[in-house]
Amino acid sequence: MPNPSILILPGDGIGPEVMTEVRKIISWFGDKRGLQFDVSEDLVGGAAYDKHGKPLADETMAKAQEADAVLLGAVGGPAYDDLDFSVKPERGLLRLRKEMDLYSNLRPAQCFDALADFSSLKKDIVAGLDIMIVRELTSGVYFGEPRGIFEEGNERVGINTQRYTESEIERAARSAFELAMRRGKKVCSMEKANVMESGILWREVVTRVSADYPEVELSHMYADNGAMQLVRAPKQFDVILTDNLFGDILSDCAAMLTGSLGMLPSASLGAPMENGRPKALYEPVHGSAPDIAGQGKANPIACILSFAMALRYSFDQGSEADRLEAAVEKVLADGVRTADLLGEDGVEPVSTSQMGDAVLAALDASL
Ligand SMILES: NC(=O)C1=CN([C@@H]2O[C@H](COP(=O)(O)OP(=O)(O)OC[C@H]3O[C@@H](n4cnc5c(N)ncnc54)[C@H](O)[C@@H]3O)[C@@H](O)[C@H]2O)C=CC1
Ligand SMILES: CC(C)CC(=O)C(=O)O
Ligand SMILES: [Mg+2]
């Protein structure tokens, strides 16, 4: 049997910095736990544009389709802001998601005990928080046609289209209900059925799917109220199911409940491959953070926890994923903090690589 394959796409800005730490962790699992992976690396985003004139080369797309899992850092940055929209770095990531058909984006927001004091919310509101946002990832307003900037009379008009088919809603909903069955058995579906037809259809389809999961309690919420509830009383939620745009926004919001955007991992899953495992891409929720790129300040934990999700969802290594998550928890409990996790208390922050090394030391201690 060949080793499972991982394609690493570090991308831009802090992407390569946080991915360096994940590479160390992958090597650790090979050396110390006998989990050997065939790891290859390629370009995406601005880095791919610099070399190929487009944000994702066709050969890279083909490699991603073949890989057992893709790990991505982040894409984008000010150097590419004025590019034509068709070749912007972010389009490379959207193409990966679309062509791999990664319709279910899992964004878990967990508040580690050691960070409960640091969250922008009061400790009792976030302590023990464990919610899962399931964001539909291959449709909605990020992909709908028509789109573009057009001339209309004597001015221009920018158009994007929110479009959802029943089957797109249904498969995202099934993935949320399946997850809820293994968690707290609650799904809250968020849309804007009060003002959007796509929201009305969303609500209808989700309600229909829920009939197949009688043990799961379904509720519906308008997404604007959902955003408010997420910061008012986030522990009321177990699984939040929502569309591409609302999921993007709500998950950045949920990230701050955990302490920092640098903490939130994600798994983007598609249909099962021949080996029964889903097509999958793992990436931190954050972007390329141009304001701190190149300074060794980035928190690598979101990317490290994304690899933990790969261990769990792509490689059937749930207990090794637990081991990695426990190592992160220990490091935080020991008070190790990158700059984004620090208040004004005079504690010295560690660098990106020092945080990676601390997780490795905690992994060693777990043996
Ligand atoms: N999945 C991806 O590749 C994404 C790419 N982007 C792109 O990234 C670029 C920058 O976008 P922004 O809106 O600034 O969002 P961002 O997520 O890159 O940064 C927002 C803020 O969070 C901080 N931050 C993010 N990740 C961090 C980490 N790991 N450690 C410490 N601090 C961290 C940044 O320093 C910044 O202050 C844009 O080109 C955007 O399109 C944005 C979001 C997702
Ligand atoms: C294509 C990405 C830049 C959009 C985004 O912010 C995200 O998926 O979190
Ligand atoms: Mg986002």
Image (cartoon, rainbow, N blue to C red):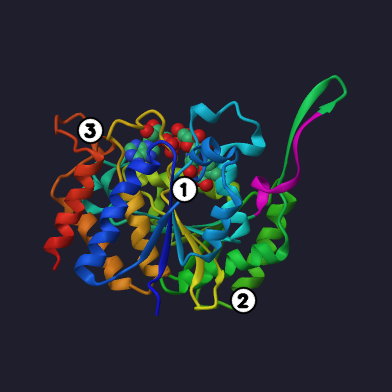
Q: Please tell me whether mark 1 sits on a helix, a strand or a loop.
A: helix
- Quarter of the image for the N terminus: give it: bottom left
Between 258 and 75, the one nearer to me in the picture: 75
In the image, residue 318 lies in the stretch drawn in magenta: no
Left or right of residue 320: residue 4: right
Task: State how many labels appear.
Answer: 3
Under 8 Å from ligand 3: the CB of mark 1? yes
Q: Which residue is mark 1?
A: 251
Q: Which residue is mark 2?
A: 211
Q: Residues within 10 Å of mark 3 (few under 14, many from 20)?
A: few
Q: CA distance from mark 1 to mark 2?
A: 27 Å
Q: Are marks 3 and 1 in contact (CB under 8 Å)?
A: no
Task: Give x and y (percent) for residue 24.
Answer: 26, 54
Quarter of the figure with residue 119: top left
Which residue is pictured at 19% across the width and 35% down the height? Answer: 349
Mark 2 is on which residue type? Ala
Q: Residues within 10 Å of mark 2 (few under 14, many from 20)?
A: few
Q: Which residue is mark 3?
A: 343
Which residue is pictured at 61% across the width and 29% down the height? Answer: 83
Q: Please tell me whether mark 3 sits on a helix, a strand or a loop.
A: loop
| Placement of 118 over or under 200, stated as above or below | above
Q: Please tell me whether mark 2 sits on a helix, a strand or a loop.
A: loop
Which residue is pictured at 28% across the width and 35% down the height? Answer: 297
Mark 3 is on which residue type? Gly
- Quarter of the image for the C terminus: give it: bottom left
Left or right of residue 275: residue 327: left
Disc 2 or 3, which lies upstream in sequence? Answer: 2
Check the image and name the residue furthest to the top: 154
| Placement of 11 over or under 153, stated as above or below | below
Q: Which residues are magenta?
A: 139-150
Q: Is residue 5 visible?
A: yes
> Which numbered disc, 2 or 3, marks the residue closer to the eye?
3
